[in-house]
Amino acid sequence: MAVHWVNYDLNTTGQKYEALITYLKSHRSWARPAKSSYFVDTDLTAKQLRDGIGEIVDSNDAVAVVTVTGQSWATHGVSKNVNDWIRNHL
């Protein structure tokens, strides 16, 4: 089990936001701290999650997947629900 922080920028006309968001939300648990950013709690590695995202997005889209440990974190302007999610999953 791991939590990964997924950040993305879909650059192609007719971006596949709906399909990407559906995929991200299909995992064990998730939180959305910012418009193009999700925390995803999953059994997948960062590489496996990135590869799954890669099947959805276009070649000129940018995606970063980072495994987070929760060792240290802070937020500003993030909802209480997301802060609670982070507190409970990291």
Image (cartoon, rainbow, N blue to C red):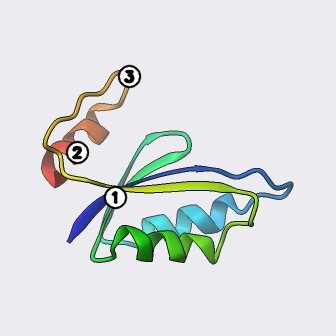
Q: Give the side of residue 9 with respect to residue 70, left or right.
A: right
The CA distance from mark 1 to mark 2 is 11 Å
From mark 3 to mark 1, how far is it between C-alphas? 20 Å
Q: Is residue 16 left or right of residue 35?
A: right
* Res. 86 mark: 2
**Picture coordinates of residue 1 (x, y %)?**
20, 72
Is residue 83 toward the left or the right of residue 48 in the image? left
**Helix or strand or loop: what does disc 2 sit on?**
helix
| Distance between mark 3 and mark 2 Cα atoms | 14 Å
Upstream in sequence: badge 3 or badge 2:
3
Disc 3 marks which residue?
77
| SS for callout 3 | loop
| Residue on which the image places disc 1 | 4
Residue at image coords 74%, 66%: 58
Q: Toward the viewer: 76 or 22?
A: 76
Q: Are marks 1 and 2 in contact (CB under 8 Å)?
A: no
Q: Nearer the viewer, mark 3 or mark 1?
A: 1
Residue type at tag 2: Ile
Give the quarter of the image for residue 49: bottom left
Which residue is painted at 70% across and 56% down in the image?
A: 61
Instruction: Give left or right: position of 74 versus 56.
Output: left
From this view, report whether residue 25 is shown above or below residue 85. Answer: below
What kind of element bears circle 1? strand
Q: Amino acid at mark 1?
A: His
Out of 62 and 10, give the one closest to the viewer. Answer: 62
**In the rendered structure, which disc, 1 or 2, sits on the residue that comes first in sequence?**
1
Q: x, y (%) of residue 14?
A: 83, 58
Identified by mark 3, the residue type is Gly
Rendered view: 80 above or below 47? above
